[in-house]
Amino acid sequence: MKYIYTIFLCFVVNIVQGQFKYFMHTYYPFTDTLNAEKFASLIQLTDSNYLAVGASTDQFTYIYSWLAKIDNQGKMVKQIKLYDTTVFKDGSQFSDIIQTYDGNFMISQVLINVAGNAKNVAMVKMNTTLDTIWTKIYSTYVGSSHTVSDACIESFDKGILAVGTCWNHLIVNSSDFYMLKTDSLGNKLWDTAYGGNDYDAAWDVVQTPDSGFLVIGITRSFGAGNLDNYLIKIDKDGKKIWQKTYGTWFSEGPTQIFRLYDDNYLIVAGGTKGPGLYDDSDGTLIKINSSGTKIWQKDYGRPVLNDELWGAVEMPDSGIIAAGVMWVDTFNNHSAFAWVIKTDKDGNQLWEHVYNILSPTVIQDNYVFGIIKTNDGGVLLNGFATDTLSNSISKQDGFLLKLDSFGCNDSLCALSATYQENYFNTIQEFGVYPNPVQQQINIAMSAGLTKLHEPINIQIMDVTGRIVYSNRYTAPPTNIITIENVYVYKGIYLIKLKTQDYENTKLFIKQ
């Protein structure tokens, strides 16, 4: 049985016109003891509920395709696990879900034979009550050892185009873009592959007004060197019209492409390693026109951190909210935090938020796979979080992270920095403001967190775990402790608050 938790976590950095605010957000992990789950794709339904698909394991042994129906409060109301029983298959996983013209759902699926390292593409059609209408399994592309699908869309003719990767069984580490076109009943019309003599993999697709398609992925066969963004334009029958690469001799890796309101396109370009904003990996967005010509490219991130963007949506104001991962070295571990940014229509960053998903007290890895707009004007992120520190067996949960258009709850975002007392009275929690910190640190606590005049121990640690500040305070009647003149270098720090009955750790940034 799965248990649903609603937990409030409070490390969020918000940059709005130069002001830093501290906000609360809500997330929903979906947990099975010792099992590993992930949400790979997500859609919202007309009734404001959601369908999320991905994979779940049985004690890390068998892989199940996993579908969950979730209401608009984050509660799971139904889940389905499908295990493929075809001969020589060790499992399956759902990779993408779309709603089709008839109101039903099409889900792309990868069938897995772990022992033989073979994979096949499958499509599953489900109705609105989540009963399977049909399942189609497609043979691997000619000359390939195995084929996978990472994304699918419904085309103008009500068929499906799935894109992914096929591997050459004669050449080690050689793969190509793979495209599979079906009719509305899942019958294959054609499939094709494009690439070079090295590694090429397709990750997303969008249809163009001329009934053709733009397929985005990664290439080592073409471009400036290492891994580059690779874009192919094909017609409705799969014939290649042109191809373009975007990148440098460093490594780049795109994850998504979609059409903008102005009829141009946005490529979410993963992480750019090298000459981006800083000499590390930066999240990148590339705006192109219908011919693939670059209009602008913007890199986002922080110094000494590796940053990646994995999904984006265009908001009604033509700005972009993009989500991904910010990598940080904490306590000698390489940890990933969920990362969300907002830009204007020209790609100029307006704000950013960073989240630690599973627990406010333990650093884990948080992986964001995608983001969708919700019908209340906000966004919803999907992915998985892994707790590798508390158990010898890694515990991995799929998660959904619900945010409003400012990356927080509406009721909080409109408030100024003086809101903390009322805010923290509502939760058993503490937080740091402003964040990032200049010299003065304010620690706000909920009213029920401490007893008046109770001793409170405060420690500040750098990312290696070294204590750089330690002091003992008496709980004040205002529930706010102020630390003046914090003389530490710029960077990311952890602050621990401990009382007789409570202990918790949060992060802050020193500017």
Image: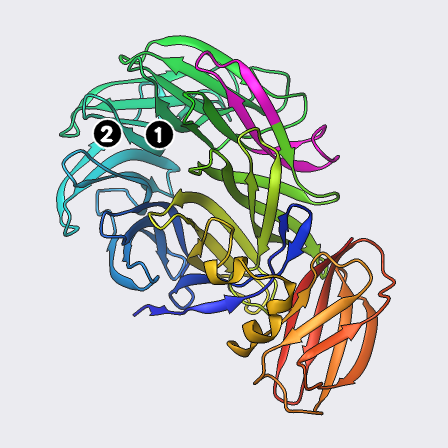
**Would residue 127 appear left or right of 483 to someone viewing this image?**
left
Give the percent coordinates (x, y) of residue 350. 60, 42
Depth check: 380 or 77 in front?
380
Cα separation, mark 2 vs mark 1, equals: 9 Å
**Picture quadrant of residue 274:** top right
Against 206, residue 453 (above or below) is below
Q: Does the image show residue 219? A: no
Q: Does the image show residue 381? A: yes
- Secondary structure found at label 2: strand
The answer to whether the residue labelled 2 contacts the one labelled 1, judged by CB atoms less than 8 Å apart, is yes
Residue 176 is tagged as none
Give the percent coordinates (x, y) of residue 117. 39, 37
**Would residue 189 appear left or right of 108 to someone viewing this image?**
left
Which residues lie in the magenta part? 270-297
Residue 147 is tagged as 1
The amino acid sitting under disc 1 is Thr
Say which residue appears at 61% left-offset and 38% top-offset.
Answer: 349
Q: Quadrant of the N terminus?
A: bottom left
Depth check: 478 or 79 in front?
478
Depth check: 391 or 511 in front?
511
Disc 2: which residue: 138
